[in-house]
Each structure stands twice: as C-alpha cells, then as structure tokens.
Amino acid sequence: MTDCIFCKIASGEIPAYKVYEDEKYLAFLDINPLNPGHCLVIPKTHYRWTYDVPDFGEYWEVAKKIALSQVNNLGCQFVSFITVGKQVPHAHIHVLPRYENDPHNEGLNTSNKLNLTPDELKTISEKIKI
Ligand code: 5GP
Ligand code: ZN
C-alpha cells in the first residue's frame, strides 16, 4: 500500500530497529516505546487488522518468539500482547515487556511514552534480536 508507514518499513524504505525478520513477517522496536523493548510484529504484506492475516496462528507464533526473547534477554517480569491499530492501519501486534512497578496495569497506558536515544534503542534491539 503506497502511503503506509509499515509497508515502507517492510520494504526498507524507512529504517527501523529490526529484531526479527523472515519471508513473511517483521518485528521491530516501536518508535515511541511504552516500556523498554516494546516491539511491533507485522506481516510484510499489507493487511488492515491482525485477523485479516491469512496464517493467523503462524503470525502469532512470531509474536511468541519475540516475547520469549524479551523474557530471556531483558529481564522483564512478563509480556503483554496487545492489538489496537487506530494509529497505523497496517496489522501489528504490540509485544510489550512488562516490568515490576511499570505504569501499565491491565492494559496499555499510552501516556507513558519513553524518550530513548538512538543508542539506547540500538542496544535494546541488539539484546532482543533473534
Ligand atoms: P496503534 O496503531 O496500535 O494505535 O499504534 C501504532 C504504534 O506504531 C504506536 O505505538 C507508534 O508509536 C508506532 N509507530 C508509529 N509510526 C512508527 C514508525 O514510523 N516507526 C516505528 N518503529 N513505530 C511507529
Ligand atoms: Zn501497510
């Protein structure tokens, strides 16, 4: 899709801190992380919603891979999987590492955007990278 930011990330036209890539899916750091290590998992082909992705189970298996890497490499307590899709109309799963005393409780508190430097984002992406 021409004007889609995530299609542009998938094609390499726009850079991102990638943590996983295969033929069909890509995972990268959210540009405005709600916790350190916040990742997005997308299908490389444009679909509007996660449930439009043809191999839904396979797609979520990628999110699981990212979550296990976050647990093993970031020292987070657990991981939340969230889908929203109001801002970017290309299917994405938020894979959000959760830390003790973070501000998210049961959901996703979007007022807690972190301001991480490019160096910090790079270091975090390298820790998660599969
Ligand atoms: P949603 O559509 O689920 O409400 O949120 C979209 C998410 O994509 C937001 O958390 C936002 O920070 C993230 N995002 C928006 N534009 C970009 C971008 O250009 N690069 C990256 N890495 N993340 C983005
Ligand atoms: Zn797209």
Image (cartoon, helix red, strand yellow):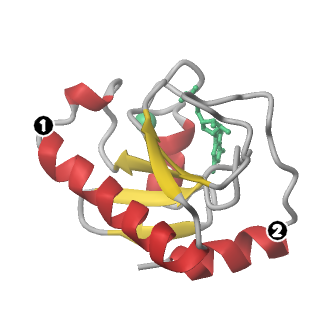
Q: Which residue is drawn at 65% across and 55% down?
A: 99
In the image, 7: left or right of 105?
left
Q: Which of marks 2 and 1 is nearer the N terminus?
A: 1
Q: In which quarter of the image is residue 45?
A: top left
For disc 2, the neighbor class at 10 Å (few under 14, some 14 to 19, many from 20) is few
Q: Quadrant of the C terminus?
A: bottom left
Q: Which mark is residue 118?
A: 2
Q: Can residue 47 be seen in this view?
A: yes
Say which of 75 and 42 sits in front.
75
Q: Residue tagged by mark 1?
A: 54
In the image, 116: left or right of 130?
right
Q: In which quarter of the image is the N terminus?
A: top left
Say which of 86 and 61 sits in front.
61
Location of residue 64 in the rendering, given as x and y in whole percent from the top left corner: 31, 58
For disc 1, the neighbor class at 10 Å (few under 14, some 14 to 19, many from 20) is few
Say which of 119 and 89 sits in front.
119
| SS label for mark 1 | loop
In the image, 3: left or right of 24?
right
User: Label 1 sits on what residue type?
Assistant: Pro
In the depicted structure, whether residue 56 falls above or below residue 85: below
Q: Quadrant of residue 125?
A: bottom right
Location of residue 100 in the rendering, given as x and y in whole percent from the top left corner: 67, 54
